[in-house]
Image (spheres, grey):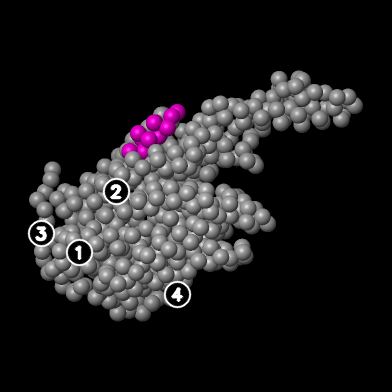
Amino acid sequence: MSTSPVDVGKPDEVDTGRLDSSSRRQILLIIAAVVAATEIVPFHLTFVGIAARFIGQSFPHENASQLTWLTTLYAILGGVAVPVIGKLSDRIGKKKIVVACLIVSMVGCAIDALTPSWPVMLLGRALQGLAFPAIFVSYGLIRDLMPRRYLNMAIALAGGGTGLGAVLGPLAGGVLTDHFTWRALFWFCVVWSLVTILPLALFVPETKLRVKCKIDWVGAALLAIGTAGVLIYLSEGGSWGWIPSLPWVIGGVVALGLFYAWELYTPEPIMDPKLLRSPRYASVLLAAFMSVGTMTGLGYVSSFLGETPGGAAGEAIKQQVAQGAAQQAAAQASLQMHTTIPPEAMQQYFSVEGHLPGLNLTLLHMTLYTIGMTIVYVIVSPLCGWLSTRIGLRRPYIVSTLAFIVAGVAYALFHSSVWDLAAIALITGLGAGAYLGTLPNMVVEAVPQEQQGVSAGMYGAFNSFGTAAASAAAAAVMAAHPLILHVNIPGHVSTTKLNTGPLAQLPAESAYTTAFYMFAAISAVAFVLSLFMRQFNRPATGGQGALSPEQTAEEPHP
């Protein structure tokens, strides 16, 4: 049942520089400046996926596992830095931090556009990762500046705005790599950052809110070590081996435990432990982990399905594998029997089990099919922000979890054509829009203003955990469902899993259905969690209803 809009006209107890007298046009221009500047992050992510094989050609001495560090370093540095940078933003100003992060990332892009050295290339990529915290700090900047009547919609707009880069990235990347070298992608990022940072620096005011505190460097170091350990395990465990990589995650979890213990002891913690114990805030972090993981997983697996070979092309690959095995067997038998055995004579004894369901789509076709999804979530996200002041944030988030469940099951059942993927992507867009329009606003509603920066930073870290965990889980499922080579030579019957080499990237259809059901199940758990998030039933207040750390300690569990 809907509720009347909450009164957000109550004056702030602390002057944050809120733009209450600004016109709607000025408000929209400020939001656009913030979103455009932080839009560089989707470009960073999509461009490296597009350019990886071209970058590999320029660094022939680096193998495929080394190339993955272009993605891993970005995720690790971004995930590690976001809580610490969030704390710094509370202390010295959120706009300053956003601008500084984007300038450093721009320098990283310039380095990668120029360098012939692989270690320097990785350094540039690491610097680019510092753009990731800027997204979450920008939520705090918007919270401090926006009139409360626009605040929830503004944050939802900022969250949904990243969809534009997700669409423009593959389009721009495809055009640039077709007509120039891969280095043009990084020059594009330099130009984009330069053009968008200037309006942000010149026309967006700085928040007046400052939290007078010392930086807890011990806590920051423990948090960084713990976050890095967990992210390295999730990102590289598949290639290094999950068991041999266990020391990374064990060390990470121990460091995070020490971080929490230290925060209880130190007089000026990087994040108040009472806030971490708050059911309201803890439920948001857990919801973010599961929902962003589901969103990432569904996107990753459906894109992989669209771009890999299937149909006649898939059958041709299976035939080539069987022929190659027959040729090897014929050559070996010829040596043993001292005669020539034609491969055709051995062909009948080899077959490949497993259906390749890929759709053979180009990158451009994949981008076009996702445009509908992006349009949906760019519209739904601010709509949820607007609705939250009337019906609260919990109901739209429930819609998000249900949409992801339906999308996961639908993908598992119907994935034989591009029209199947395009139609289901609209449902995914509904889930993504409702998620991006509610979870960042839940952080605003759950934490006091003076802890917005570090709280949004921790929320960003859990986004990184969810993304890395989803990618790792999808990769594990793919590896567990390979094509199988059957050998039925008289006197010798065997099966071999084709889970090494290039064919490891071509799992059987069962891998996709299993992965889609898995992410639907994760969203089902998120749905159950949402039923207990009754603290967000009330209309959103733009942060006026946030609890102080003292109140969070007394907050009842749902």
Give the residue at mark 1. 26
C-alpha span from label 3 to label 4:
42 Å
Labels 4, 2: front one: 2
C-alpha span from label 3 to label 1:
22 Å
The answer to the question of whether label 2 and label 3 lie on touching residues, with beta carbons closer than 8 A, is no
The one of 188 and 132 positioned closer to us in this rendering: 188
Give the structural element (helix, strand or loop) at label 3.
loop
Residue 111 magenta-drawn?
no
Q: Quadrant of the N terminus?
A: top left
* Badge 3 density bin: few <14, some 14–19, many ≥20, Cα 10 Å: some
| Circle 4: residue type | Val
Labels 3, 1: front one: 1
Give the residue at mark 4. 218
The answer to the question of whether label 4 and label 2 lie on touching residues, with beta carbons closer than 8 A, is no
The answer to the question of whether label 3 and label 4 lie on touching residues, with beta carbons closer than 8 A, is no
Say which label, 3 or 1, has the lower sequence index: 3
Rendered location of residue 75, percent (x, y): 47, 58
The answer to the question of whether label 3 and label 1 lie on touching residues, with beta carbons closer than 8 A, is no
C-alpha span from label 4 to label 2:
40 Å
Give the residue at mark 3. 7
At x 35%, y 64%, the residue is 196
Q: Residue 305: in sight, yes or no?
A: no
C-alpha span from label 4 to label 1:
42 Å
Say which label, 3 or 4, has the lower sequence index: 3
Give the structural element (helix, strand or loop) at label 4.
helix
The correct choice, above or below, for 75 with respect to 409 in the image is: below
Give the residue at mark 2. 378
| Circle 1: residue type | Gln
Rendered location of residue 342, percent (x, y): 80, 23
| Circle 3: residue type | Asp
Residue furthest right as drawn:
338
